[in-house]
Amino acid sequence: MRSAQQILAGASVIAVVGASRDPYKPAHTIPLQMLRHGWRIIPVNPFVDELFGVPTVPTLAEIDEPIDLVNVFRPARDAVDVVRQAVAVKAPAVWLQSGIVSAEARRIAEEAGLEYVEDRCLAVERALGQLTKRP
């Protein structure tokens, strides 16, 4: 398995489950930061039509392009279902944000062959690795 930074460096398209319209929440500021550093962000939120100037989709199943990474901003109790959805859409990796831990989600991901990161922040790993997708 690759490290968290290797997974992030290898990703171009990140589906963000639980992306928020609230500019004070990490579920808003972190995907926005990743977008500004060159990643393609697909916000997954059934309650809003657009975030960060990007159309949202209500579920992972409604994304009509390959996803490199599913980033999860949902409570740990929802992580199991999100990981099942990630397996169904054949996402190669799942990343649960800081504070989100689920042994069951990890088991499902690993049994399906998905790379799995939990309790880590995309933006922190991006900064530590000085990663960007810009040329």
Image (spheres, helix red, strand yellow):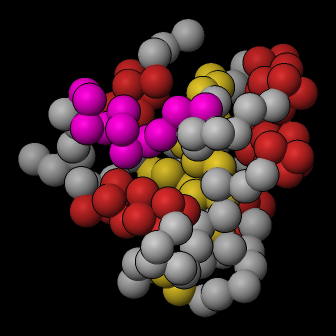
- First to last magenta residue range: 119-129
Residue 8 is covered by the magenta coloring: no
Q: Quadrant of the N terminus?
A: top right
Q: Nearer the viewer, residue 51 or 11?
A: 51
Residue lying farthest to the bottom in this orientation: 49
Residue 127 is covered by the magenta coloring: yes
Majority SS type along the magenta span: helix
Q: Is residue 23 shown left or right of residue 93? A: left
Q: How many marks?
A: 0
Identify whether 91 is placed above or below 35: above
Tell me, yes or no, if residue 64 can be seen here. Answer: no
Residue 60 location (% of width, % of height): 72, 60
Residue beneath the point at 38% across and 25% down: 5
Q: Is residue 85 shown left or right of residue 2? A: right
Residue 33 location (% of width, % of height): 32, 59
Q: Is residue 73 shown left or right of residue 25? A: right
Residue 27 location (% of width, % of height): 54, 62
Tell me, yes or no, if residue 98 can be seen here. Answer: yes
Residue beneath the point at 84% across and 23% down: 103
Q: Nearer the viewer, residue 72 or 25?
A: 25
Residue lying farthest to the top in this orientation: 1
Residue lying farthest to the left in this orientation: 135
Residue beneath the point at 25% across and 27% down: 129
Q: Is residue 94 shown left or right of residue 52? A: right
Quarter of the image for residue 69 reads: top right
Identify whether 66 is placed above or below 121: below
Residue beneath the point at 61% across and 89% down: 49
Identify whether 44 is placed above or below 33: below
Identify whether 93 is placed above or below 72: above
Q: Nearer the viewer, residue 127 or 25?
A: 25
